[in-house]
Image (cartoon, helix red, strand yellow):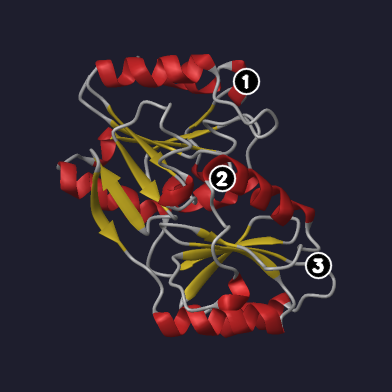
Amino acid sequence: MNKAALFFDVDGTLIDEQTKIVPESTLRALKQARENGHLVFINTGRTSCNTLDSMKHIPVDGYVCGCGTEIIYQGNVLMHSTLTKEQCRRYIQVIQECHMEGVLEASDDLYFPQNSSRFPEIEDIRQRMGKAWGLGCKKYIEDGGFIYDKMFLLSDQTSDVVKFIKEVRDDLAVIDRRHGSYECIQKQYTKATGIEYMRKYLGYDMDQIYVFGDSSNDLAMFEYATHTVAMKEHDSVLDPYTEYVTDSVMSDGIEKAMKHYQLI
């Protein structure tokens, strides 16, 4: 078959959400796909500081990071977009006014609240990223004065999410990740714009593009592509755009899907 470009979400697609591991069957399938001449990309909401080192054991040709805000191919940064200095300052103020908390994500670091968060998920991310990669330890959200690419925020009954969305909607797309969590991305970028950038760069046709995902932040690339693979446990928002539903991560879902399409 013609060479294809394969774009994979990370959490819940390549990595099992519960065990936090990549199954051997997935690593085997990715390796075989590349040997067959296909290009393999990680397409993630994570920024590059939280992707390149932690994903280096996964055999890939490139990365679409931060929901399309940074593209890396064969070790070279092809494009990178950040929020402006003024936007970065203002959004910190809005987050505080709306009583939300989260992680501000840059290409070189992650930024957390200075004090312990009332959200256990934030503290879990802080602990894992700090212990494993030394991220989030140099500067805090309250310090300000830094540039970032996107935000992951949590809310509860004390938060004014409606006000927050109203304040940022001109510049940011706010993706509802369920259970009070929101991913906030520069409006002109998505996982789909990252794929389109690489498709044009490579000179590939749409039929050569395959995407694999499971969550609501994969919706843009599912709307974009023809060949779309949803994991067994996936957000129902993907259903209208899903061409094939594969098995779960730990039940060799990636390998089974790639065999289904005769990519391996």
The image position of residue 168, as x and y in percent, is: 55, 80
**Count of numbered circles in the view:** 3
Residue under circle 1? Answer: 250
Q: Is residue 216 left or right of residue 25?
A: right
Nearer to the camera, 229 or 239 = 229
Front disc: 2 or 3: 3
Q: Is residue 214 above or below residue 31?
A: below
Q: Residues within 10 Å of mark 3 (few under 14, many from 20)?
A: some
Residue at the left extreme, as displayed = 203
Quadrant (top left, top right, bottom left, bottom right) of the N terminus: top left
Does dot 2 land on a helix, a strand or a loop? helix
| Residue type at numbered disc 3 | Asp
Nearer to the camera, 19 or 165 = 19
The image position of residue 118, as x and y in percent, is: 81, 63
Residue 8 sits in which quadrant?
top left
Q: Give whichever of discs 2 and 1 has the lower sequence position.
A: 2
Query: Cα distance, mark 2 to mark 1?
Result: 20 Å
Front disc: 2 or 1: 1
Residue under circle 3? Answer: 156
Residue 18 sits in which quadrant?
top right
Q: Residues within 10 Å of mark 2 (few under 14, many from 20)?
A: many
Residue under circle 2? Answer: 238
Q: In this view, does 136 lie to the left or right of 229?
A: right
Does dot 1 land on a helix, a strand or a loop? helix
The image position of residue 181, as x and y in percent, is: 69, 60
| Residue type at numbered disc 2 | Leu
Q: Is residue 146 above or below residue 239?
A: below
